[in-house]
Image (cartoon, rainbow, N blue to C red):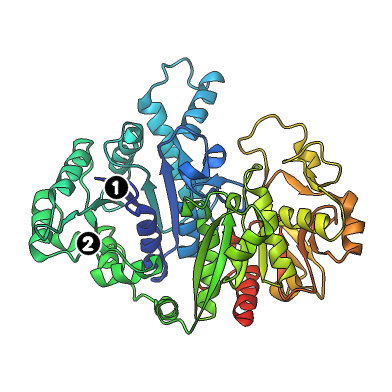
Amino acid sequence: MTKYIFITGGVVSSLGKGILAASLGRLLVSRGYKVSIQKFDPYINVDPGTMSPFQHGEVFVCNDGAETDLDLGHYERFINTNLSQINNVTSGSVYQTVINKERKGEYLGATVQMIPHITGEIKSRLIQAAKKDSPDILIAEIGGTIGDIEGLPFIEAIRQFRSEIGRNNSMSIHVTLLPYLPTSGELKTKPSQHSVNVLRSYGIQPEMLVLRTQVPLGKNEREKLALFCSVDKNCVIECKDMDTIYEVPLYLEKQGITKEVLDILQLENKEPNLKDWEELIDSIKHPKREATIALVGKYTELNDAYISVVESLKHAGFKNSAKINIKWIASENITSDKEAEKILSDVDGIIVPGGFGIRGIEGKLKVIKYARENNIPYLGLCLGMQCAVIEFARNVAGLKDANSTEFDKNTEYKVVDLMEEQKNIAGYGATMRLGSYPCKILPNTKAYKAYNNELINERHRHRFEFNNEYKDILIEKGLVISGTSPDGLLAEIVEIPENDWFVACQFHPEFKSRPQNPHPLFLGFINAALNQK
């Protein structure tokens, strides 16, 4: 029978519940347990696909095409498992399902209510996730903060579910902030006590507290929290701020969190195998080299908008015992070739990630031109590939004012155009080309050298594509299409062979990178940047 761990948060949001879930998952996997992780988000959107990156951060895409919360990226990277649609549940998706059932008459004329219908649907998602992957342990993270109105159905569903599956088959971990007052030199436990009281008022007594703190937790604070929150002293876990998120599992392991969790769930505390993770942390903390990478995007005010890209760059750096410094550049601030040269003169590589809309596009084109003409290693992702094609068409192939129809519907040279399958679609949510698709790699190319494989699978999220009408003229001018769909109709990877590294792909390789197994394209890019440096 699957055991369940429910993670809630209190006092403030953005406490790192997702990192805790991922870290605990890593520690359980290191003991040989099969783990799956599920995220419950209380917002009414069906999924984050239509939400602004400024509000929500990155949209993470799974193999099955699910557009999910960025925490699923952390889950996949830490436990090295591919997740799917069932691992991300929103209030919107729950309400939509219940309403659709009501419209079909599946409730046999009953009055549809929060209890039992909404809570029942939430519980069914837990059961579906357990049936799909048959994990030994399913970790479920509840988004938001305890006391939020929109989160109450999830808390009530958990209360019901825990009573239904019996004692020792589940546990509750509550994550809270432990504020430090520098003027008095004190850690204050009262906010955490109040947060636990709110959780208790909804019928859930947590078995464990994880406390986010800037300074170490003292004996007095630990004993006070254990006493007032009715939690065993050994289950009051300190989680202080770390230099890197990848240190969190080892820090929690030293706190004894895994032993306590397994004791509560009545599972064997097997000997962990964390040697590879310890070696990873050693390479992170003792780099022998470093490189500066310019990340040129539209949403640079919120770093979480590109979190998988940043982590993928770091992964490639870890493999090379190198520290990767990110230089954040807002593309709309680059208004001339001279401005591009001034801003980029000190970087070792340039990456242009995905995005939508015309804002900042001309700045990206100037950045790509600078990279191409000055042989600066370049990696383009999704929109970054489309912009590379536009820049090459304009400045090498002589197709003046070439563009994408996303930015100029009346452009004379539509080198990037709406995909045929997208032309009759009216809506936006979950309507793009989404999920994992195969790609055939051309031999004797940089892409083939990176992958060392003729057929790969990568995750997509786009509506526009390379227009094959311009294929011959661009190839004649030196552009190499090194990756295509198996039928050859969709250009997946382009590159410029004269440059040390100028590769751009239509897909999102950042979604498949892992800290101990960096993605081949990111690895090739960082290798080129380090070699040039």
401 or 96: which is nearer to us? 401
Displayed quadrant of residue 484: bottom right
Mark 1: few, some, or many residues within 10 Å (few <14, many ≥20)? many
Q: Quadrant of the C terminus?
A: bottom right
Q: On the rendered structure, is 397 left or right of 428?
A: right
The circle on residue 316 is none
Q: Secondary structure at mark 1?
A: strand
Observer-nearest of 262 and 78: 78
**Relative to 370, residue 14 above or below:** above
Name the residue that disc number 2 marks.
237
Relative to residue 506, is residue 237 drawn left or right?
A: left
Of marks 1 and 2, which one's residue comes earlier in the chain?
1
Q: Residue at 41% of width from left, 27% of height from top?
A: 117
Residue 178 position, x and y percent, is 20, 54
Total numbered labels: 2
Q: Amino acid at mark 2?
A: Ile
Q: Residues within 10 Å of mark 2 (few under 14, many from 20)?
A: many
The picture places residue 211, in percent across and down from the top left corner, at 23, 57
- Identify residue for label 1: 9
Q: CA distance from mark 1 to mark 2?
A: 14 Å
Q: Is residue 382 visible?
A: no
Callout 2: helix, strand or loop? strand
Residue 378 in view: yes
Q: Which kind of residue does numbered mark 1 sit on?
A: Gly
Residue at 66 percent across and 61 percent down: it is 338
Work out which quarter of the rendered image holds the N terminus and state it. Answer: bottom left
- The percent position of residue 58, horizontal first and vertical second, equals 52, 50
